[in-house]
Image (cartoon, rainbow, N blue to C red):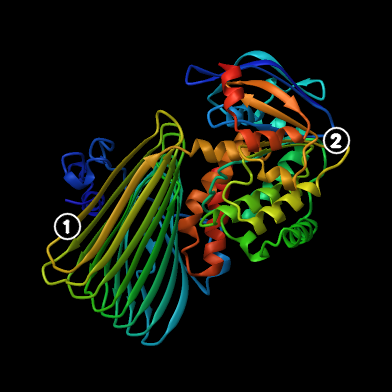
Amino acid sequence: MLSVKDLHAEVDGKEILKGLSLEVPAGEVHAIMGPNGAGKSTLSYVLTGRQGYDVTSGKVTFEGEDLLALEPDERAAKGVFLSFQYPLEIPGVPALTFIRTALNAQRKARGEPEVSAPEFLKLARAKAGELKIDFDMLKRALNVGFSGGEKKRMEILQMAMLSPRFLILDETDSGLDIDALRIVADGVNALRSPDRAMLVITHYQRLLDYIRPDRVHVLSAGRIVASGGPELALELEREGYDKYARAAA
Amino acid sequence: MSVASAIKTGDAAELPGKRDEDWRWTDLRGLIRQVPPDSAPAAAVGAGPFDGAAEEIVVIANGEGAAHIGVDPHGDRTVALRIVSRGDGSHAARVSIDVEADGRLTLLESYEGEGSYLSQTGLVFSLGVGAQVERVVLAADDAEGVTVSEAEVQLAAEASFGQTVITGGARRQRLQTTVRHPGGHANLRLDGVYLLADKRHADLTTVVTHEGLDGVTEQLAKGVVRDQARGVFQGRIVVAEGADRTDARMGHHALILSDRAEVDARPELEIYADDVSCAHGNTVGRLDEDALFYARQRGMPDDVARALLTEAFVGEVVERIGHEPARDIAAAWVAERLRGG
C-alpha cells in the first residue's frame, strides 16, 4: 500500500532522513521505533507534505501513485491521516465544525456528496460515545484548553470520523494515562481492517502492548537499521537503542 | 476644523489631514482637493441589512431624516438606523440619542453607500443612570465613498454601553467613538472588526476617558486586510486623576494577508489614577502556518482552511454581540466578505 524507497529529506538544510526504505502492505500494522532525533517525526511530516520538510531524493508511492506530488489535502483525501504528536489548538472553530468541514472537503475531492447535518451529528455522537468523549466538548473550540489526553482522544475521534485508509500515529501514547491509552488503543484497533494499513511511531514499547504490530522497524540516524516481528519491540525495551545507534554511525 | 464644518462651508481647508496627529493615517485634506457640492435628496434607498431585526426603522438619506431617537425611563426600543449615501455630493447629519434612566435601546446602525460621496454623521448618545444601550454598526460603504462617523457617548453611573462596529472600509473611512466614562460601575464595551480588500481603508478610532471611581471598559478589535488595503486602529484610554479602581482592557489583533496590505495601530493607555487594572495587547501578523497545515492534513484545501481560520479569528468579536438576530446578520455579513475576498 505504502512504498518508500531510498528517501532523503532535509529540514533547514540539514539532512534528517538518509536513505529510508519501507514497505507497508494493506491490512498490516507496522511500528517505527527509534531514539529521539532519529527522524521519526520528520518521516510523518514528509509523508503528509508539511512545508519545510524537503525531499531531496527517493520515492514514495501510495497505492502505486506518487504521494510526494500531491498537496497535503490531496493526500488526506486519498486516505492518509496523521495523528499529531502535538495536536494544534484551533481557536474559534468548534470541533464539530472543523471535522465536518474536513470530511466534506475530502468527500468533495473524491467526487462524493456532502454529508447532511443530521447524518453527521449522528455519526459524531456515536463515535464520541465509543471514545468516551463528552459530546458537549465537540461544541467547544477544537483542542483549546483541552488536556493532553483529551487532545489525543480528539485525534482518534477525527480519525474514526474521517475513516482514513492509511493511519500514521505519531507518539500517540505520549501524555496518556493507562485508562486513556486503553480507550485510544481500542479506537485505533477498531479501525484495523484488510484494506487499511497503519504506521505506529513510538519511542516506547508500551503502546505496542495495546496496538499489536505485524512488523517492527528500528529507525536510527535517518534509516531503517533493523526490522523484525513484535519480539523486536520487546528486545528494544530490554536492551535500549544503543547497539542500533552504533550500527547507524 | 472638522469634517462637518468643511461640508457646511464647502472649504476643503477645514478637513483634517496628516498634520493633525489623530488623523495622520486618515488624511482627508490630502485626498479631497475640493469639497463636492451638496448632495441632492436621495430617491429610492431599497432595504437595509437590519430591517428584519428591528421594530422601527429610521432612515437618514443624504443627510436628510429624523434627528432624534429617545427612550423613556424604563422604556425598551430596538431601532434600525440607516445612514444612506447616494451619488457624488457631500452631506452631513446629526443624530441625538437619549436613553433615560433604566431605559434600553438596541441600535442597529448601517452605513449604506453608492457613489463617490463625502458623508459625515455625528451621533450624540446620552445615557441616564442604569440605561443600557447596545449599538451594532455595519458599514457597507462604496469603494469610492468617503465616510466619517463621529459618535460621542456620555455614560451615567450603572449604565452600560456595548458597541460592535463592523466595516468593509471605503475609499477613506473613519468610524470614531468618544466616550466620557463617569465610573460608578458603568460598563463599556467597544468592539470592532475591519475586513478590507482592494484599496479600501478603514480607521477605527476610540477615545475613552475614565473620570470617576469603579469604571469598566473592555475593547476587542480585529482586522483582516488583503490586497493593498489599509487598516487603522487608534484606541486611547485615559484614566483621569481620581478614577481609581478603573478596570480597562484593550486588545487589537490584525491579520495581514498580502505583502502590500498595511495596518497601523496605536493603542494608548494614559493613567493618572491609583489602584487601576489596565492591560492592552496588540498583534499584527499572518495566519498560523501550523494550524493551516493541521487543517490541510485533515483534508481542507488551502483556500478552505484559510477561510475557516480567518472566520474564526474574527468570529471571536462577532460572538460578543448580545442581540441575537443582529449577531446572526453580522456573522453572515462577515462570512460573505471573507469568502468573497
- Residue A123 placed where, x, y %? 78, 57
* Left or right: B270 in relation to B262: left
Looking at the picture, tell me which residue is in the foreground, A96 or B93. Answer: A96
Residue A130: which disc?
none
Asked which quadrant contains residue B23, the reply is: top left
* Left or right: A229 in relation to B335: right
**Element under disc 1:** strand
Which residue is located at x 54 percent, y 32 percent?
A36
Q: Nearer the viewer, mark 1 or mark 2?
A: 2
Residue B270: which disc?
1
**Element under disc 2:** loop
Tell me the chain of label 1. B
* Left or right: B335 in relation to A179: left
Asked which quadrant contains residue A20, the reply is: top right
- Residue B310 placed where, x, y %? 52, 45
Separation of residues labelled 1 and 2 (CA atoms): 66 Å
Tell me the chain of label 2. A
For the C terminus of chain A, the image quarter is: top right
- Residue A97 placed where, x, y %? 65, 53
For residue B251, above or below residue B304 = below
For residue A246, above or below residue B80 = above
Label 1: how many Cα within 10 Å (few below 14, some 14–19, many 20+): few
Label 2: how many Cα within 10 Å (few below 14, some 14–19, many 20+): some
